[in-house]
Image (cartoon, rainbow, N blue to C red):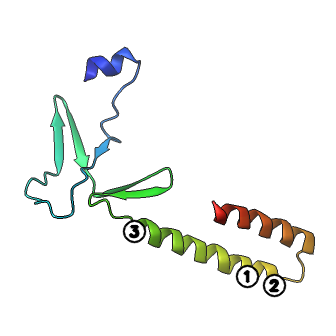
């Protein structure tokens, strides 16, 4: 492993590198080891992680990711409500912000 990594000019950061296994829904979870040891490196096992804004977890369930997205959408919505009711903010700025958030939520 180290030879292949060095061949491409990369290094393993053993402090930041963690691992996760994805299992089937009904699989037995007997072999849940906390650390994976490969030669001189020891990697910590995690149950979930965020990658490119998406939360991945061991049982391949996206419920937590959906809850996180809904929570963030609600925060944004209520923040914009107080912003749009403010009389000191120009109407042109309010419309520009509304159009921007509309495009982001449709993606």
Q: Relative to 31, is 1 on the left or the right?
A: right
Image position of 21 with respect to 11: above or below: below
Q: Quadrant of residue 90?
A: bottom right
Q: Is residue 10 found left or right of 101 in the rendered image?
A: left
Report which residue position mark 2 lands on: 85
Report the quarter where the C terminus lies.
bottom right
- Which x, y percent locates residue 33? 13, 51
Q: Are marks 2 and 1 in contact (CB under 8 Å)?
A: yes
Q: Residues within 10 Å of mark 3 (few under 14, many from 20)?
A: some
Q: Callout 1: helix, strand or loop?
A: helix
Is 9 located above or below residue 45 in the figure? above
Q: Residues within 10 Å of mark 1 (few under 14, many from 20)?
A: few
- Label 2: element kind: helix
Q: Which mark is residue 55?
A: none
Q: Quadrant of residue 100?
A: bottom right
* Residue highlighted by disc 1: 81
Q: Earlier in the sequence, mark 3 or mark 1?
A: 3
Mark closest to the chain's N terminus, 3 or 2? 3
Marks 3,1: beta carbons within 8 A: no
59 with respect to 100 (left or right): left
Q: Is the residue marked by circle 2 packed among few (<14), some (14-19), or many (20+) residues within 10 Å?
A: few
Residue 64 numbered mark, or none: 3
Q: Secondary structure at mark 3?
A: helix
x and y, in percent, of residue 65 in the image: 43, 65
- Which residue does the image show at 45% across and 73% down from the upper left? 67
**Which dot, 3 or 2, sits closer to the camera?**
3
Where residue 52 appears, as percent x and y from the top left, is 50, 50
Q: Residue at x 24, y 42 (%)?
A: 43
């Amino acid at each position: 492993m180290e030879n292949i990594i060095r061949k491409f000019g990369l290094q393993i950061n053993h402090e930041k590198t963690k691992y996760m296994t994805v299992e089937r829904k009904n699989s037995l979870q007997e072999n849940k080891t906390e650390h994976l040891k490969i030669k001189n490196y020891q990697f910590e096992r995690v149950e979930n992680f965020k990658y490119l804004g998406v939360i991945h977890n061991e049982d391949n369930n996206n419920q937590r990711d959906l809850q996180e997205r809904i929570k963030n959408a609600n925060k944004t919505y209520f923040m914009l409500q107080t912003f749009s009711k403010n009389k000191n903010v120009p109407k042109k700025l309010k419309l520009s912000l509304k159009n921007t958030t509309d495009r982001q939520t449709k993606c």
